[in-house]
């Protein structure tokens, strides 16, 4: 078993949480309309939840197998919080929370532009000019597809009504 990778303590709890989440999603997807046919309204959500369940079971089983072999050899394991909750993840969750807070106030275009620009600049670390270009390109494509093609009304915001 020399090919086993070091297991992080977060893999097993993460696998358990993902399995529970996937089972909950599968239960709720089944509650949409049951599974009467492949074209029923709940078929696609059930399919997605079943794929999530399979993937989370693989993560959990691999974590258990790796832990059994590596944990028994006395190798040091990565601390749970530093591997399960890295600083970048916490900051991104905070950024998403700010996006959700400002979306109804500033509208889709402004809040999405700020969110995407900060995300690209922070996570991708591509530079301010490239982040600006990718943000503008992304928003243009999203606007053309959803507003023009599908006629989806995007939130305008209460602080800047009629601007975007």
Image: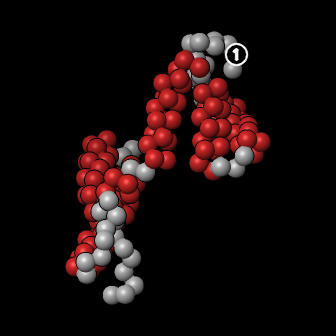
Work out whether residue 137 can be spotted. no
Work out whether residue 81 can be spotted. yes
Residue 163: name its quadrant.
top right
**Residue annotated with mark 1:** 163
> What's the colour scheme?
secondary structure
User: Residue 134: where, in percent of width, then height?
Assistant: 72, 44
Image point (52%, 30%), residue name: 99
Task: From the viewer's perspective, tell me whether residue 71 is left or right of residue 102.
Answer: left
Residue 39 lies, with reference to residue 94, above or below; the image says: below
The foreground one among 45 and 71 is 71
The foreground one among 117 and 43 is 117
Task: From the viewer's perspective, tell me whether residue 81 is left or right of residue 71.
Answer: right
User: Residue 123: where, in percent of width, then height?
Assistant: 59, 48
Image point (53%, 23%), residue name: 102
User: Residue 160: where, in percent of width, then height?
Assistant: 63, 13
Mark 1 burial class by Cα count in 10 Å: few <14, some 14-19, many 20+: few
Residue 128 lies, with reference to residue 13, above or below; the image says: above
Residue 73: name its quadrant.
bottom left
The foreground one among 25 and 125 is 125
User: Residue 145: where, in percent of width, then height?
Assistant: 67, 38
Residue 30 lies, with reference to residue 52, above or below; the image says: above
Q: Residue furthest bottom?
A: 1
Task: From the viewer's perspective, tell me whether residue 141 is left or right of residue 7.
Answer: right
Task: Identify the secondary structure beneath mark 1.
Answer: loop
Residue 66: name its quadrant.
bottom left
Image point (34%, 70%), residue name: 7
């Amino acid at each position: 078993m020399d090919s086993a990778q070091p297991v992080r303590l977060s893999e097993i709890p993460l696998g358990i949480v993902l399995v529970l989440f996937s089972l909950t999603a599968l239960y709720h997807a089944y509650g949409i309309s049951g599974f009467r046919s492949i074209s029923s309204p709940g078929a696609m959500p059930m399919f997605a939840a079943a794929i999530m369940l399979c993937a989370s079971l693989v993560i959990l089983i691999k974590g258990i197998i790796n832990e059994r072999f590596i944990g028994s050899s006395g190798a040091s394991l990565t601390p749970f919080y530093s591997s399960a909750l890295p600083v970048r993840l916490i900051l991104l969750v905070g950024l998403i929370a700010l996006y959700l807070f400002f979306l109804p106030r500033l509208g889709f275009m402004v809040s999405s532009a700020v969110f995407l620009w900060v995300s690209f600049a922070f996570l991708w670390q591509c530079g301010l000019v490239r982040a600006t270009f990718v943000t503008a390109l992304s928003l243009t494509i999203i606007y053309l597809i959803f507003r023009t093609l599908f006629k989806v009304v995007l939130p305008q915001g209460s602080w800047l009504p009629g601007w975007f």
